[in-house]
Image (cartoon, rainbow, N blue to C red):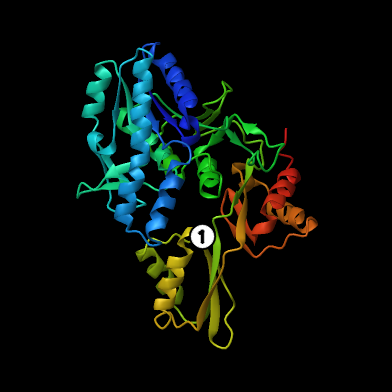
Amino acid sequence: MLVVKKFGGSSVADRERIMNVARRCIEDYEKGNDVVVVLSAMGKTTDGLLEKAREITETPSKRELDMLLVTGEQVSVALMAMAFQSLGVQAVSLNAAQVAMRTTSAYGQAKLKRIDTERIRNELDARKIVVITGFQGINKYDDMTTLGRGGSDTTAVALAVALHADFCEIYTDVDGVYTADPRIVPNAKKLSEVSYDEMLEFASLGAKVLHNRSVEMAKRYGVKLVVLSSLTRAEGTIIKEKTSMEKMLVSGVAADKNTARISVLGVKDEPGIAFRLFNLLARYRINVDIIIQSVGRDNRKDISFTVARTDLQETMKIINDHLEMLTADSVSADDTVAKISIIGAGMTSNPGVAAKMFEALSGANINIKMIATSEIRITVLIDEEDASRAMRVVHDAFSLAD
């Protein structure tokens, strides 16, 4: 059996945790399994590297930033290989260039294109544990690239696909997927299983357990995915195509504070304006979520939408540079908002779910600014200062606690 195991930064934050991870991996290895380990940078290393970059310049080149950030994972994998060796097990560390993990050239948000597995297979055949850097790849220029924050999850799933692994295990500092963030909602319940579609919504809407692109890939290729804690032996959450949880109306509540609302004001009320705006943002790879268009008046209307707060400055510059093309009077932004979402495959066949969510927020005197829905989720935009309280009241309204 071949198992891919991914460990996040908190799981390898110091010597004690590195040795803990090594021992857990050796347990599988000693059962005769082939083991591939994917690591993030230790602890808050990536944040520290970003801070060092900001000490030099507020606008670092994306290429040079990737060159800097990939060093974090290289430290992790080298130390982990040493840990295995100190425990008497053969191991080798490999970075993305040595594996040949080919990506697109979008520095900071590259996407994996293909993985050359020959080197990995050779090392596994020599009965070594193979330790590979997550989060990174190489593009057609042989430059280092990164996959975006949380990208080590995507690396692990991609390796599981390429190697036809039997399992892909994602180890974090929590012991599974919960109905809400247990740090904010103390009575949140751990889910024994969740569907790919629900997990994708959780990941896209603020739950930090898994990178959304890793879930997309797992669903596309049918990878058996398990979320576990590296710190305890508790059973984790299985993510798969179909679950036995049809009885659950709502599977959980998620909050996303990395959100900003942008309003393009006074655009002409005529066909093609929305296309011009969102096609423009797509060309710059700006992802847009909730969209609301006002009713036209005096041949003018307003278009409001949300973007990641990290994209706010760039988005505002793009729109301001194209106000005339967009026939807009002005553009404004609000970065003091947050998204609260309920997620559940059971919502499609149950009317009144939205009303129940809105009732809970109204009862807590929380104002809703924007609303978006899909078959398995309802998302509202509220003031950021109300986000934690909103999670708790909505969670309680759907009786998701233990």
299 left or right of 102 in image:
right
Please, which residue is most extreme toward the bottom here? 298
Left or right: residue 228 versus residue 382 is left
The quarter of the image holding the N terminus is top left
- Which percent across, then down, holds residue 163? 31, 28
Picture residue at 46% right of the left edge, 61% below the top: 311
Residue under the point 48% across and 64% down: 312
Residue 91 vs 224, above or below: the answer is above
118 or 23, nearer to the observer: 23
Residue 323 rendering spot, x and y as whole percentages: 43, 80
In the picture, the quarter occupied by the C terminus is: top right
Q: Which residue is mark 1?
A: 309
The x, y position of residue 159, in whole percent, is 33, 33
Please say whether residue 272 is visible from this viewpoint: no
Residue 400 quadrant: top right
Q: Return the residue nearer the eye: 346 or 329.
A: 329
Does residue 133 sit above or below 372 in this rendering?
A: above
The answer to which quarter of the image holds residue 40 is: top left
Q: Residue furthest front?
A: 55
360 to 79, vertically: above or below: below
Residue at 76% across, 53% down:
360
Q: Is residue 274 placed above or below 118 in the rendered structure?
A: below
Task: Give residue 4's quadrant in the image.
Answer: top left
